[in-house]
Amino acid sequence: MAKDKDYRQMIHTARWAALRRSVLSAHPLCERCLEQDRTEAATEVHHICPVEDAVAYADKRRRMFDPSNLRALCHNCHVEAHKALGRAGKAAAIRRNEEQTRQVIERFFGKRAET
């Protein structure tokens, strides 16, 4: 589950619920399973480019509600997608926070963050 407050706020909107229903209606079968010649019902919607990786709220919103950034997956494929992105666990959360800090420094102060 995402820890970003903006993401948590957007995921509980009527707009997201409607978009999620639309994606699952258009793709009732897991897109990843189909690529691997398996048939499994899609139960979750995955953001291909993670919402939390964006720095500005407007960029997060764009990623959140962009249909081309969404993929219908079964639960197992959704977990695997996050593992492949290195987004699972405490270490991933620490890396994500460090990267966001670096992006903020670059964006607002125009310089590279020292490591």
Image (spheres, rainbow, N blue to C red):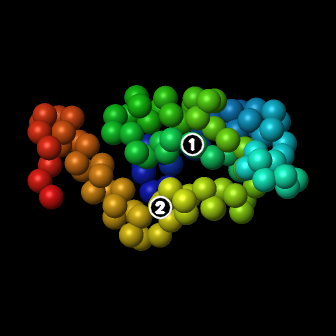
Q: Residue at x 58, y 29 (%)?
A: 66
Q: Residues within 10 Å of mark 1 (few under 14, many from 20)?
A: some
Left or right of 16? Residue 50 is: left
Q: Is residue 44 above or below residue 104?
A: below
Q: Quadrant of residue 98?
A: bottom left
Spot occupied by residue 87 in the image (x, y as percentages of width and height): 48, 60
Quote the CA–CA distance across marks 2 and 1: 13 Å
- Which amino acid lies under the numbered mark 2 shown in the image of this protein? Gly
In front of the other: 35 or 102: 35
Coordinates of residue 69 in the picture (x, y in percent): 58, 35
Marks 2 & 1, CB-CB < 8 Å contact: no
Q: Earlier in the sequence, mark 2 or mark 1?
A: 1
**Image x and y of residue 90, in percent:** 41, 70
Quadrant where the N terminus is found in the figure: bottom right
The residue singled out by tag 2 in the image is: 86
Identify residue for label 1. Answer: 48
Q: Residue at x 57, y 31 (%)?
A: 65
Residue 86 at x, y percent in the picture: 47, 61
In this rendering, position of residue 107 left or right of residue 87: left
Crowding at dot 2, Cα within 10 Å, few <14 / some 14-19 / many 20+, comes out as some
